[in-house]
Amino acid sequence: MLPRFSIVICNYNYGRYVGDAIRSALGQDYPADRFEVIVVDDGSTDDSHAVYAQFAQDPRFLALTQENRGQSAAFDAGVRQATGDYICLLDSDDVFLPSKLQRIASHIAELKEEPGKLFLCHNLAIESVRSQGSVRIDQTWFDVVNISRLPDCLTLQNAPGHFVFSIPCGLVFARDLIASCLEALPMSEFRVGTDGVLCPAALIKVGRTHYVREPLAVYRLHEANEFAQVVDGRFTPRHDTRTREPRRLHFLERWLDLQDLNTEERAAG
């Protein structure tokens, strides 16, 4: 039987983009009874709720609301509501390509990964979004973070020292795996950049992440994007993520101590 997916979208005041994200999630070339779409609104004050109403009649769609608590808390709320075997995250200003779930399901079948231990990153196309239209750049996300040079399965033993994961729209987790990682996160410390701590936490817990080199979603860079921009056709960071490092490393050190690992795995972690 085909796996069941839960697509969890986090949104805060991106009413102008979130409709595209929802449509891309609901428009998957995958059996309608094998996936659901959950939007968690993180205290939006714009027209986001009017956008959700456009999809209210679709039985696969659910909108949850909470006070503004940040990205980690929003993803956690969505995962707690989810019923799928696997969780696909999606930021509200990005979009999935129509074949994403079908391609991920095929790859899961090939991997034969242990139940509850799947952690997968797929590649992303990158678009520069402007008022006059969108332009796709030559770089993919795997090019930006040098995943293109790594093997198809990253382990604790061969992991380099920099960030070698996808951002939310390129992440797929077994539901129990992501739930356990999010449950341990101090939400108030990680209001943004959830992927920066969630991905290494998942790698430490299960010891490996699988790469799918095909771009299955689009990372959209626009003027309101705080993390990065496109300059002269190239991906260019806007935010210095090193400011998050002390609290990220502090959490991961504590997280490592909680895992049931052998001596070699703990040393690699």
Image (spheres, rainbow, N blue to C red):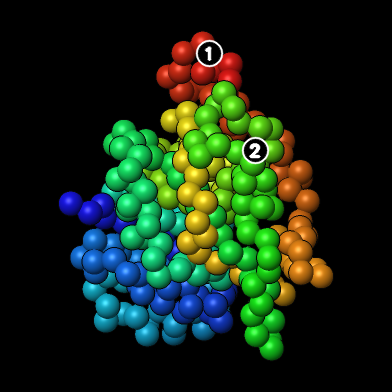
Residue that extends furthest to the top in the rendered view of this protein? 263
The amino acid marked with disc number 2 is Arg
Report helix, strand or loop for mark 2: helix
Q: How many marks?
A: 2
Report helix, strand or loop for mark 1: helix
| Percent position of residue 76, x then y | 43, 51
Identify the residue position indicated by label 1 in the image.
264
| Percent position of residue 14, x then y | 56, 75
Q: Residues within 10 Å of mark 1 (few under 14, many from 20)?
A: few
Left or right of 221, for residue 61: left
Q: How crowded is mark 2: few (under 14 residues within 10 Å), some or many (20 or more)?
A: many
Tell us which disc is closer to us: 2 or 1.
1
Quadrant where the C terminus lies? top right
Q: In the image, is residue 29 above or below residue 79?
A: below
Identify the residue position indicated by label 2 in the image.
248
Left or right of 242, for residue 194: left
Q: Which of 194 and 228 is in front in this view?
A: 228
Residue at horizontal 74 percent and vertical 62 percent from the top: 235
Residue that extends furthest to the right in the rendered view of this protein? 232
Residue 117 lies in quadrant: top left
Residue 157 lies in quadrant: top right
- State whether residue 39 appears in this view: yes
Residue at horizontal 27 percent and vertical 70 percent from the top: 60
Residue that extends furthest to the left in the rendered view of this protein? 1
Residue at horizontal 80 percent and vertical 68 percent from the top: 231
| Percent position of residue 207, x then y | 47, 28
Residue 9 lies in quadrant: bottom left
- What distance separates the C-alpha of mark 2 from that of mark 1? 23 Å
The amino acid marked with disc number 1 is Glu
Residue at horizontal 53 percent and vertical 13 percent from the top: 264
Q: In the image, is residue 16 above or below residue 42?
A: below
- N-terminal of the two: label 2 or label 1? 2
